Amino acid sequence: MYVKDALRLIRKELTAIEADDVFVSEAINKCIALCNKGLAPGELPPHQRHSETSTAAAIGIKDRFPEKKESILVLFSKEANGLTDEEGQIITGINGNSYRPCRISLYDGGYLKESGNRRYTMLGNLAEVWTITDKGREYVQEMMDNQTEALF
């Protein structure tokens, strides 16, 4: 089971709890917020575990990683023809060393997939075109629904 799937199940169970105690309700809401962030407490973004500098970079981006992943996933939901890593980096303005770990995590989680197509980069190399999966579309829709509910 992927971390996102486990967090989704936990969030569903927490949402079903009805608590009269304000402190219990607040604790439940904080747990739900952690689930919504998409990373289990203590989990680091993808990095080269043998490298101290890569580990340090993962620790540095950990708090912003969930939001970056979500913004990248939303971008993919709008791109019918998919994106190469280079195209995604240009559109989002996210540096490749931050973008790639997000895209890898989305791929590992089943939210993105290889399209089987390739496009040329600015340097003339062929690059994989990534597309969103049904699971990714469902997540984006759920995210949008939750934002709409929060407005009311």
Image (tube, grey):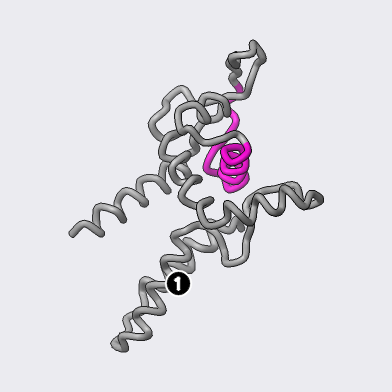
Q: Is residue 8 magenta?
A: no
Task: Please give the name of the residue rendered at 66% of the width and 49% of the height, measured from the top-left corner.
Answer: 46
- Seen as rendered, the residue at the extreme left is 152
**Residue 83's spot in the image, x, y percent?**
51, 26
Specify the farthest residue to the right: 50
Residue picked out by circle 1 = 31
- Pinpoint residue 59: horizontal percent, then vertical percent: 63, 56
- Residue kind at label 1, given as amino acid type: Cys
**In the rendered view of the protein, which quadrant contains the N terminus?**
bottom right
Residue 75 falls left or right of residue 129: left
Name the side, left or right, on which 139 lies relative to 120: left
Up the image or down, 120 lies above or below 114; here it is above
Q: Quick one: quadrant of the C terminus?
A: bottom left
* Picture layout, residue 24 above or below residue 115: below
Give me the residue at 62% from left, 45% from top: 108
Q: Is residue 100 magenta?
A: yes
Q: Which residues are magenta?
A: 97-116
The part of the image, by quadrant, that contains residue 98 is top right
